[in-house]
C-alpha cells in the first residue's frame, strides 16, 4: 500500500519551499504524507477564523512579537484557503521568494486538501523558534480532517518557508481492551482502483464467532479511521474482539489508491462496493458464523445500501445522518461560526458560499465534473439518487442506530428523525449523551479542537454494539 499514494506524495516536490528553514517537526509531532485528521493539540487554543481575511498583517520592518507571528500565520493560512495565491507570492522573501510561484502554491495546496472536503476554519496555532527562524504551525480544519500549515518567518515577518504536512500522533489501547484475547492478521482486498490493505482481528477463543465489517466516514480514511491521535476503528476492532467478535477493517479506496472524492466517483465507488467485498471476504473465514455491517457517519448513511447488496445478519449505523449530506454541511459550518456567540463578516461569507453550493446540489444545477462542498458532481448525483431512508425501511435484518449527544457534525436530532422514519420491530435506537462525532466521551459543546486530544470510543457504545452483534 505504501506505493499507492501519488496524490499525497506530490507534497515532496510541490509543498515544501524554503525547506532549510523548516527542517524539523514542530511540537514533537510525527508528520506523514499519508494520514488524515488532526494532530494532538498541546498548545493554547487561538481564535477560530473560518473564512477569508483580507487584512493580512504586513511586515512592519520591526521585530514581531510571538502573538504577531501567530496572527500573521493565521491570516496567511486564510489567504491560502481562499486561493489568494498571487497575493501570497509577495509575502515571501530571500531565497524562498525565488522558489515560489502562484502555480506552485496552488498545486501544493490542492494536492494536500483535495480529499478533505470544505475548509471550516483554524483549530489552533503554535509558535516555536527553530534555528533562528520563527515558525508557526497552523492547524487548518476541513470537513474531513486537518492540515498542518507550517510558516517560517524572519524577525520582521517576511515568509522564508512554507511546509504542508498531514499529521499523526501516537496511539495507545483503551482500558477496556484485553490484547491477550485476540490475534490480528493482515490481508488484501481486491478493488478496481488498487488492492486495499486490511486487518482481521480474531478472538483467540475456540469455536465460531460473529463478525463485523467496519465502514468509514467521509474522507480518505485508513483502516483504523485515524483522526490525529485517535483511531476510531482500531478502538472498535480491539474492543469488539475483546468481547468475542471478529472484525474486518480496511483502507478506504480514496486512501489506498489514486482516487479522490473530487474525481468523478459515486457513493458505490468510494464506499459501498468495497464494503460488500469485505463482507464477502469475512464471511469466508471458517470460524465466522455471521457478519454485521457497521458504518460510521457517511459509512452509516451508506449502510442500508450495503446491507441490501450483501449477505449480512445485521446492520449498525453509528452517527448516521438522516438529513441529506449537502444540507448538513452548511449547518456544520454555521455551528462552528456561532460557537463564540457572533458570526463575523468573513464567517458569513463562507456560510453563504456553502449554502449556495448546497442549494445548487439540492436543485440539481451542477455538472458532474465540478467540485462542490468537497465532492465531485458525480458523487452528489449518485447520492441524490440513493434514498437511504427508504432503503433502510426495506431491510429485514436487525438494525441498530447509535448517536452521540455531543455530535455537532451529525446532531442528536438526526436520531429523532430516524426514530420517526423507521418503524420495523427489528430496529433499535441508542443515544449516548456524552459522545461526540468520533463516538468519544467528553463534556460541554463539541468543536474540532476536541479531536486533537487523544481519546477512545466510549466503552458503553462498544458494549452495546457487541451485544447487538452477538444477537444479530
Image: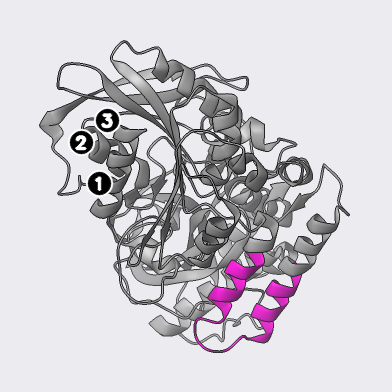
- Spatial CA span between label 2 and label 3: 6 Å
Q: Is residue 194 above or below residue 301?
A: above
Callouts 2 and 1 close, C-beta under 8 Å = yes
What range is drawn magenta here? 329-353
Q: Which of 411 and 190 lies nearest the eye of the viewer?
A: 411
At x 77%, y 62%, the residue is 357
View extreme (left): residue: 180
Asked if marks 3 and 1 touch (Cβ < 8 Å), the reply is no
Q: Quadrant of residue 290?
A: top left
Residue 230 in sight? yes
Q: How many marks?
A: 3
As helix, strand or loop, the secondary structure at mark 2 comes to loop
Main secondary-structure element of the magenta-colored stretch: helix
Residue position marked by numbered label 2 in the rendering:
243
Is residue 172 rendered to the left or right of residue 81? left
Say above or below: 462 vs 432.
above
- The local crowd at label 2, few if under 14, some if 14 to 19, many if 20 or more residues have their Cα within 10 Å, is many
Residue 245's tag is 3
Q: Which residue is mark 1?
A: 463
- Residue 451 position, x and y percent, is 38, 61
* Mark 3 nearby-residue class (10 Å; few <14, some 14–19, many ≥20): many
- How is this picture coloured? one colour
Amino acid at each position: 500500500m505504501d506505493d499507492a499514494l501519488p496524490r499525497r506524495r506530490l507534497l515532496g516536490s510541490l509543498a515544501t519551499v524554503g525547506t532549510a528553514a523548516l527542517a524539523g517537526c514542530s511540537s514533537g509531532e510525527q508528520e506523514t504524507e499519508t494520514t488524515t485528521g488532526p494532530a494532538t493539540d498541546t498548545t493554547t487554543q487561538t481564535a477560530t477564523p473560518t473564512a477569508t481575511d483580507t487584512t493580512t498583517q504586513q511586515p512592519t520592518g520591526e521585530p514581531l512579537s510571538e502573538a504577531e507571528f501567530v496572527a500573521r500565520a493565521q491570516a496567511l493560512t486564510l489567504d491560502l484557503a481562499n486561493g489568494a495565491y498571487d497575493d501570497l507570492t509577495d509575502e515571501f522573501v530571500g531565497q524562498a521568494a525565488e522558489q515560489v510561484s502562484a502555480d506552485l502554491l496552488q498545486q501544493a495546496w490542492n494536492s494536500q486538501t483535495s480529499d478533505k472536503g470544505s475548509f471550516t476554519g483554524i483549530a489552533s496555532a503554535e509558535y516555536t523558534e527553530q534555528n533562528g527562524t520563527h515558525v508557526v504551525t497552523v492547524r487548518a480544519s476541513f470537513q474531513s480532517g486537518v492540515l498542518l500549515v507550517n510558516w517560517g518567518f524572519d524577525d520582521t515577518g517576511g515568509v522564508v518557508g512554507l511546509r504542508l504536512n498531514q499529521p499523526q500522533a501516537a496511539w495507545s489501547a483503551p482500558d477496556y481492551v484485553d490484547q491477550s484475547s485476540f490475534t490480528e492478521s493482515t490481508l488484501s482486498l481486491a478493488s478496481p482502483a488498487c488492492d486495499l490493505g486490511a486487518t482481521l482481528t480474531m478472538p483467540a477463543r475456540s469455536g465460531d464467532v460473529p463478525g463485523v465489517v467496519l465502514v468509514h466516514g467521509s474522507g480518505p480514511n485508513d483502516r483504523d479511521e485515524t483522526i490525529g491521535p485517535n483511531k476510531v476503528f482500531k478502538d472498535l476492532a480491539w474492543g469488539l474482539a475483546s468481547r468475542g467478535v471478529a472484525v474486518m477493517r480496511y483502507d478506504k479506496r480514496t486512501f489506498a489508491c489514486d482516487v479522490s472524492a473530487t474525481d468523478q466517483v459515486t457513493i458505490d465507488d468510494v464506499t459501498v462496493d468495497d464494503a460488500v467485498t469485505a463482507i464477502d471476504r469475512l464471511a469466508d473465514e471458517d470460524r465466522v458464523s455471521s457478519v454485521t455491517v457497521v458504518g460510521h457517519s457517511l459509512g452509516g448513511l451508506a449502510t442500508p445500501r450495503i446491507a441490501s447488496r450483501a449477505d449480512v445478519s445485521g446492520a449498525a449505523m453509528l452517527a448516521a445522518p438522516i438529513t441529506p449530506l449537502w444540507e448538513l454541511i452548511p449547518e456544520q459550518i454555521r455551528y462552528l461560526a456561532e460557537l463564540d456567540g457572533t458570526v463575523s463578516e468573513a464567517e458569513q461569507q463562507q456560510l453563504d458560499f456553502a449554502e449556495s453550493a448546497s442549494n445548487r446540489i439540492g436543485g440539481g444545477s451542477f455538472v458532474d465534473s465540478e467540485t462542490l462542498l468537497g465532492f465531485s458532481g458525480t458523487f452528489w448525483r449518485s447520492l441524490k439518487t440513493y434514498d437511504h431512508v427508504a432503503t433502510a425501511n426495506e431491510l429485514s435484518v436487525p438494525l441498530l442506530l447509535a448517536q452521540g449527544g455531543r455530535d455537532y457534525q451529525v446532531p442528536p436530532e438526526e436520531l429523532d428523525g430516524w426514530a420517526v422514519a423507521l418503524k420495523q420491530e427489528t430496529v433499535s435506537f441508542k443515544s449516548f449523551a456524552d459522545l461526540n462525532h468520533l463516538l468519544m466521551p467528553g463534556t460541554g459543546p463539541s468543536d474540532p479542537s476536541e479531536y486533537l486530544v487523544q481519546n477512545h470510543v466510549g466503552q458503553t457504545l462498544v458494549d452495546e454494539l457487541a451485544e447487538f452483534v452477538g444477537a444479530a
